Every structure is written in structure tokens, then in C-alpha cells.
Image: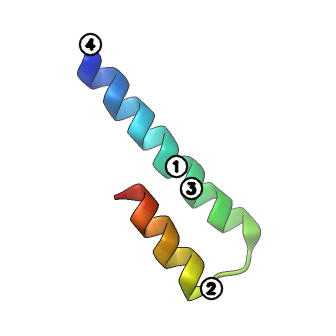
Amino acid sequence: MFIVTEVSGGSNFAVLAIVTIVLGQEYYTRQIIATLFQIT
């Protein structure tokens, strides 16, 4: 059960980071790199 909650929590964080970048509609290299570092 612990693994399920860990995976869902991690994927939720990644999805929110990507959605925030997409909804901002401005794509700077610095933002994309920072988002990638946060996801991994």
C-alpha cells in the first residue's frame, strides 16, 4: 500500500509541474530545466 501512495504522490507532483508550465504559455529554457529537475 505504501508504494501505491508514493507513486501517486510523485506523479501528482510531476503533473502539476507540467500543467503549470503549459498554462503559463511562455516557455523559457530556465523554466523547462527547473521543471525537469523538480520532476526527477
Q: Amino acid at mark 2?
A: Tyr
Q: Amino acid at mark 1?
A: Val
State the quadrant of the N terminus: top left
The mark nearer the N terminus, 4 or 2, is: 4
x and y percent of residue 32 in the render? 52, 76
Q: CA distance from mark 4 to mark 2?
A: 38 Å
Helix, strand or loop at mark 3: helix
Q: CA distance from mark 4 to mark 1?
A: 21 Å
Q: Are marks 1 and 3 in contact (CB under 8 Å)?
A: yes
State the quadrant of the C terminus: bottom left
Residue at 43% over, 33% down: 9
**Residue under label 3:** 17
Helix, strand or loop at mark 2: loop
x and y percent of residue 23 in the render? 73, 63
Q: CA distance from mark 2 to mark 1?
A: 19 Å
The mark nearer the N terminus, 2 or 1, is: 1
